[in-house]
Image (cartoon, grey):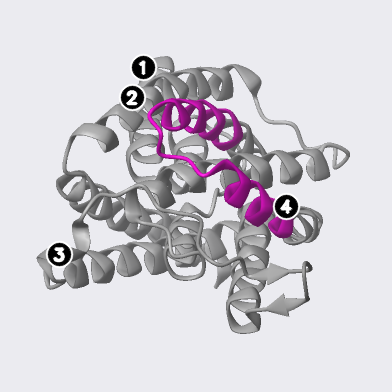
Amino acid sequence: MTLALAVVAGALIGLSLGALGGGGSILAVPVLVYTLGQSPAQATTGSLVVVAVTSLVGAIAAHRAGNVLLARGAVFGLVATGGAVVGARASAAVAEPVLLGAFAVLMLVVGTLLAVRQWRGRHADAGEGTTRRPGLDDPIITFSPTFACQCPRALKVLVTATAVGLLTGFLGVGGGFLVVPALLMALSLPLEYAAGTSLVVITITSSVALLARSGSGIAPDWWPVVALTAAAAVAAVAGARVADRADTRRLSTAFTGLVLAVAAYTAAQALPALV
């Protein structure tokens, strides 16, 4: 039964990461804690394994479909690594009830932001959804022939990337719910390319955060993590195909409802321990 739950949960996580470019990883910690019996510290470490492997598989599938801008994703991910290291080290110093309580609050915030984003999307002009391959726009910083800097955009990328890294390292989430909007606004990417490119960012930040935790002495129960990761990786490939062929708004709406439901359950379980 535990293995079956891991497979089903992994499929949901992978579909979300592959189709939406993020969000699914936020389910990994509650799944590992409440259905697979791991401690919050073990779960936030195991979640990084799930997220890193699944995002890598999804990024490869999205790249083959032509929906990844590799250089931009790599730069954003490298900027975020500093925050990932700090977050991973801070997580080891925090009590588990606080860790799980913070995760519950994060889920509620993410679910609300997803709902607001969908509401705004329904009221956007129909012309905004035009699919096109983006050209090479003006870079944020150039050194030749003269130095030039679009500093407001550079600051936006720096702040958002650092926040993504901190969340990834501290709570074991991929941060795709922050990466996708950041790539849309700061780098002016169309939605379909932002979703695929975000998987590159998540792969980098999750891997760095996992390496930063490697000396903490906290190891998850590996068999459930492996089952969850395998199911998520397979589903991520399917999710990338869904993103390339179908309207993902319905999937996004269903996923938002799931996140809010899991958030409410996590809060009900975690917050009383803080009182």
Q: Determine crowd level at label 3: few under 14, some 14-19, many 20+ residues with C-alpha closer than 10 A.
A: few
Q: Quadrant of residue 244?
A: top left
Q: Label for residue 8?
A: 2
Q: If you read the primary sequence from the N terminus, does the residue marked by circle 4 or circle 2 appear first?
A: 2
Q: Nearer the viewer, mark 4 or mark 1?
A: 4
Looking at the rendering, in which quadrant would you find the C terminus? bottom right
Q: Amino acid at mark 2?
A: Val
Residue at mark 4:
78
Q: If you read the primary sequence from the N terminus, does the residue marked by circle 4 or circle 1 appear first?
A: 1
Q: In the rendered structure, are the residues bearing label 4 and label 3 in contact, judged by CB atoms less than 8 Å apart?
A: no
Q: Quadrant of residue 115?
A: bottom left
Q: If you read the primary sequence from the N terminus, does the residue marked by circle 3 or circle 2 appear first?
A: 2
Q: If you read the primary sequence from the N terminus, does the residue marked by circle 4 or circle 3 appear first?
A: 4
The region drawn magenta spans 51-80
Q: CA distance from mark 3 to mark 2?
A: 37 Å
Q: If you read the primary sequence from the N terminus, does the residue marked by circle 3 or circle 1 appear first?
A: 1
Q: Nearer the viewer, residue 237 or 10?
A: 237
Q: CA distance from mark 2 to mark 1?
A: 6 Å
* Residue 130 left/right relative to 59: left
Residue at the image point whose x is 48% and y is 61% from the top: 183
Instruction: Determine whether 12 is above or below 113 in the image.
Output: above
Q: Residue 147 appears at what percent x and percent y?
A: 78, 76
Secondary-structure class at tag 2: helix
Q: Nearer the viewer, residue 254 or 93?
A: 254
Q: Determine crowd level at label 1: few under 14, some 14-19, many 20+ residues with C-alpha closer than 10 A.
A: few
Q: Is residue 83 magenta?
A: no
Q: Residue 116 appears at what percent x and percent y?
A: 25, 71
